[in-house]
Image (cartoon, rainbow, N blue to C red):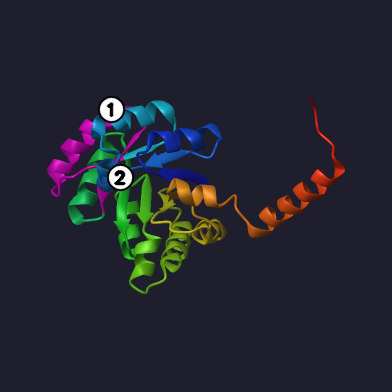
Amino acid sequence: MRFFVDTADIAAIRELHELGMVDGVTTNPSLILKSGRDIAEVTREICDLVPGPVSAEVIASDAEGMIREGKHLAEIAPNVTVKVPLTWDGLKACKALTDDGHMVNVTLCFSPAQAILAAKAGATFISPFIGRLDDIGLDGMELIADIRQIYDNYGYETNLLAASIRSVNHVIECARVGADVITAPPSVIKAMASHVLTDKGLDLFNADWAKTGQKIGA
């Protein structure tokens, strides 16, 4: 399973990338706002840092506008993935941009039916949102499992990119189901290294080591 980091924070991306934890990056208008930077500038910097796919999202709501903006974003770097919403116009834009040879991430997917349409339109990635479904009392992981089964049934080549990851458990469940990619905030990826028993074990080892009065090295 590939790890994409969901942020436009260059420092956070760099830290994870240096550890080999970043296979790609996803951004959206909210993350660009949080960065306080120009979308082209920060996207270019991310693309220079991370060789994998970097999603940059269009703002237009009509297909023509999405295609125009998508082509503009794709000119920033060869690893830009144009992010379009899962609307009818978004599907039209996905088909046109894919036919032009661009990677496309269809986002804001909340049903298996939407995911089927995205695959038929040639999406490189489909981004179903787990956390936002959980927020309204539905089971976001059920959507991931349904899409995985449907895509496998018919050999769709669209990558299942699980998004709106809120917890380490979401990541583990996505791995169990067989998501191709997860995109998560840096905090969730870093939290995967934590366990209360690891901390307890280290405390015990350190206490016992102090009692030996020894040092390792100079």
Residue 188 in picture, x, y percent from top left: 48, 52
**39 vs 61, nearest the viewer:** 39
Q: Name the residue under label 1.
A: 76
Residue 145 in picture, x, y percent from top left: 47, 64
Instruction: Name the residue located 52 percent from the left edge and 57 percent from the top edge.
Output: 168
| Magenta region includes residue 84 | yes
Residue 196 in view: yes
Left or right, 122 with reference to 141: left
For marks 2 and 1, the one nearer the N-term is: 2
Residue 181 in view: no
State which quadrant residue 114 falls in.
bottom left
Instruction: Name the residue located 56 percent from the left edge and 52 percent from the top edge.
Output: 192
* Label 2: which secondary element: helix
Instruction: Name the residue located 43 percent from the left edge and 52 percent from the top edge.
Output: 160
Q: In this view, does 140 lie above or below 5?
A: below
* Label 1: which secondary element: loop
- Specify the amino acid type for callout 1: Ile
**57 vs 33, nearest the viewer:** 33
- Classify the position of the C terminus by image quarter: top right
Q: Give the range drawn in magenta.
A: 56-85
**58 vs 124, nearest the viewer:** 58
Instruction: Name the residue located 35 percent from the left edge and 39 percent from the top edge.
Output: 8
Left or right, 21 with reference to 6: right
Left or right, 214 with reference to 56: right
As measured in the structure, the alpha-carbon distance from the residue carrying label 2 to the one carrying label 1 is: 18 Å
- Specify the amino acid type for callout 2: Leu
Residue 147 in picture, x, y percent from top left: 42, 61
- Which dot marks residue 31? 2
